[in-house]
Image (tube, grey):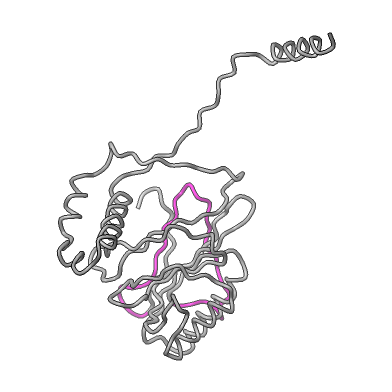
Amino acid sequence: MTEYVMFRKDRLGRRGGGVILYIKESIQACELKLEKETECEEAVWCNIVTGNSKLTVGLVYRCPNVSMEENEKMHNVIKEVSKRDCIITGDFNHVHIQWTSLQSTGREDQEILNLVQNSFLSQHVLEATRGENVLDIVLSSQKEFVDNVKLCEPLGCSDHNQIHFIIKVKGERNRKIRYRTTFHKGRYKDMREYLAKIDWNNTLKNNTTIECWNMLKSEIDCVVDKFVPLKKQVKRSKKKHLSKEAIRKIKVKANDVEDI
């Protein structure tokens, strides 16, 4: 991918698999190397510079039949990374956790749930990402780091829903960058083809009017995010019609008037 820096960790001992993380070239980022005893087989970590601080971003894949040793390594690294500003996301394959009520039935599921709570991490994905289960999660050390979480249709041949979210941190010099949607550059042919593949009858079936509207709005938001590009808004500086000397003389004259 052009204009992106790639961080990857391939699966060992077999073809295919692994994790890959892309960061925009415009964002200052470097790979974070962890201690060997806490290094997970399928996880990649990087530090992003945000103003005068750093944000650690991690991408993790936990195999459903993970070994106890590897599971413990993953817990240790999450415990360590959670001590700093961080966002951790990925497919954790915990099928028995109810994130809305913070309850679980399996032993391993309860362990990760305890870890998240004891590390004061916030989990932002509350809807099912595959079937009826929340397998893919987004953790953050501060709740306000993650905003506008949305689930979208699977990408390619994947059977997991995409998770779109915004990371909110202070950038360099605390400048707030604003973007506007350039609808005149939207890929409307691709948009129509995407929407045509949705089975609206089954999707909206047995739902109330409000529920149907929210589902439709969510799909439209996803389509806009996917096929309509954003453009950075440039704040135009105000033209100075008066020189510094002219402003100084106006102030002097104003003071003279007050003295009278």
Q: Which residues are magenta?
A: 13-41
Question: Going 78% across and 12% down the picture, which residue do you hit?
Answer: 252
State whether residue 115 is above or below residue 49: below
Q: Say if 3 sits above or below 99 in the image.
A: above
x, y (%) of residue 165? 42, 59
Q: Can you tell which quarter of the image residue 259 is in? A: top right
- Quarter of the rendering occupied by the C terminus: top right
Question: 99 and 145: which one is in front?
Answer: 99
Residue 135, image quadrant: bottom left
At x 76%, y 13%, the residue is 254
State the residue in front, 92 or 180: 180
Q: Nearer the viewer, residue 16 or 53?
A: 53
Residue at point 20%, 69% (across, down): 206
Compared to residue 72, the image places residue 177 above or below, namely above
Q: Residue drawn at (41%, 86%), measured in percent from left and top? A: 66
* Residue furthest out toward the right: 259
Quarter of the image for residue 160 reads bottom left
Q: Position of residue 70 (x, y in %)?
A: 47, 84
Is residue 206 part of the magenta span, yes or no? no
x, y percent for residue 105: 42, 89
- Coordinates of residue 220 in the picture (x, y in percent): 27, 52
In the figure, 241 relative to 46: above or below? above
